[in-house]
Each structure stands twice: as structure tokens, then as C-alpha cells.
Amino acid sequence: MTTPEDVPGAGELVLLVGLGNPGPQYGGHRHNVGFLVLDELAARVGGKFKAHKAGADVLEGRLAGERVVLAKPRSFMNTSGGPVAGAARFFKLPPSGVVVVHDELDLPFGSVRLKLGGGENGHNGLRSVTKSLGTKDYYRLRVGVGRPPGRMDAADYVLRDFSLTERKELAFVLDRCADAAEKLLRDGLAAAQNAFHTGP
């Protein structure tokens, strides 16, 4: 049984935000996996993203029976908090009605984890969102991209395309992430964690 505190937006409108960098040159980067998950969710919602005055491309619709706004900030990753907070203000949503989808170095490739609040783990996009929202108390859907090999710098690693092997699995991973988002909206955080915090 879910509680209002367990479900983003508590049965009202939910803002699902994917983090990434705008522009085709960044499209396949690990850092852009948030955008890729949002594209998968948009396919499920049905419709196309449109420019919004909040500084993001948005799509309104229904997902898992809930009213949602999908948003991809048009600013770069390190300043994505402004568009996220702008969209939350425009749609009159508290931080607890926001779900941020982002890449996570500390999880193996393909892992999906969900949480409410917590630290940013050095993720500049999350740091910007936290600063702009004024709180860490928003939902996160963390998509594992793994650690860089050898002595490669983490910043260089996330700004590279997925490997050939990873690209073969990527469609499955994005589908699983979208399933996790739907489970979170439908059944709440605890149920989504129980369902998706196993396996990869």
C-alpha cells in the first residue's frame, strides 16, 4: 500500500526531467542517458517535445495513469537546475513532485536505482538542480554507466559515447528505466525499489 509521501506528486501532476547536454554532438554520450530515457518515455506517452519558456523542451501527457510533464533542459548539464526549477514553478509543483533521471558512475552499466533525496555524488547536474530547487528532497532515477577504465578521467568518460558492447544492450536498459519510472508513478518508491533494485 502506497502513502502520499511514497509517490511523486502524491497523485497530482509529476515532472519527469532527464539530464543531459543539448545538441546532436552529445546525443550518444553516457552523460545524456537521462535524455535517452525521456525519449523512451515520450514514445510511451505519445507526442513530441516542444520548446517551453522555462528553458526546456516539454511534453505533457499521461503515463502509468498519471498526469506527467516530461522535460529536457535546453541548458548544459552544469546549469540544468534553472530550467528544472522554472518548469516546477510554472506547473506549480513542489520538489516532491519532481523526478530527475540521470547517469550514475557509481553503478554498473545497466543498473537502475531509485531514491528520494540524498547527495549528488559529484554530479554537476544534480548539484545545479539541488541549488535551484533549494532542497535535495526530490526523486532520482539513477541509471548506471559504470566507472571509467584505468586512469581515465570521469569527466572524459561520461562525455564519450557508450561502447559498442553497451550500445547493443542500451535499448533494453532504456526500456527498463522507463518501466521503473512507470512503477514509481503507479505504486510508489518502496515498490519500485523492490522491483528494480535486483539484478544488474
Image (tube, rainbow, N blue to C red):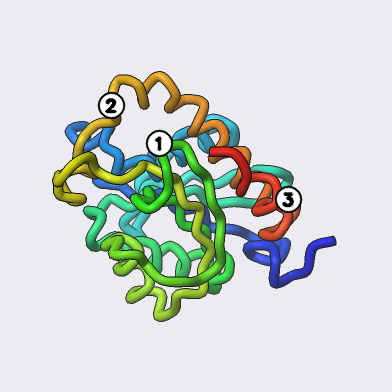
Question: Residue beneath label 1, please?
Answer: 36
Q: Position of residue 121 (x, y in %)?
A: 34, 65
Direction front: furthest residue: 150
**Residue at (40%, 19%) from the top-left corner?**
168
> Distance of mark 1 from mark 3, alpha carbons?
21 Å
**Residue at (67%, 59%) from the top-left corner?**
189
Q: Secondary structure at mark 1?
A: helix
Q: Vertically, is 110 above or below 147?
A: above
Q: Which mark is residue 186?
A: 3
Q: Secondary structure at mark 2?
A: loop
> Distance of mark 1 from mark 2, alpha carbons?
15 Å
Q: Are marks 1 and 3 in contact (CB under 8 Å)?
A: no
- Image check: 48 left or right of 106? right
Residue 34 in sight: yes
**Residue at (42%, 48%) from the top-left corner?**
107
Q: Nearer the viewer, residue 78 or 169?
A: 169
- Image check: 91 left or right of 162? right
Q: Position of residue 196 (x, y in %)?
A: 63, 45
Residue type at tag 1? Leu
- Image check: 29 left or right of 178? left
Residue type at tag 2? Ser
Question: Residue beneath label 2, please?
Answer: 163
**Residue at (53%, 38%) from the top-left corner?**
200
Earlier-in-chain disc, 2 versus 3: 2
Residue 185 in sight: no
Q: Position of residue 85 (x, y in %)?
A: 40, 68
Crowding at mark 1 (Cα within 10 Å: few <14, some 14-19, many 20+)? many
> Looking at the rendering, which quadrant does residue 50 occupy?
top left
- Image check: 112 left or right of 80? right
Residue type at tag 3? Arg
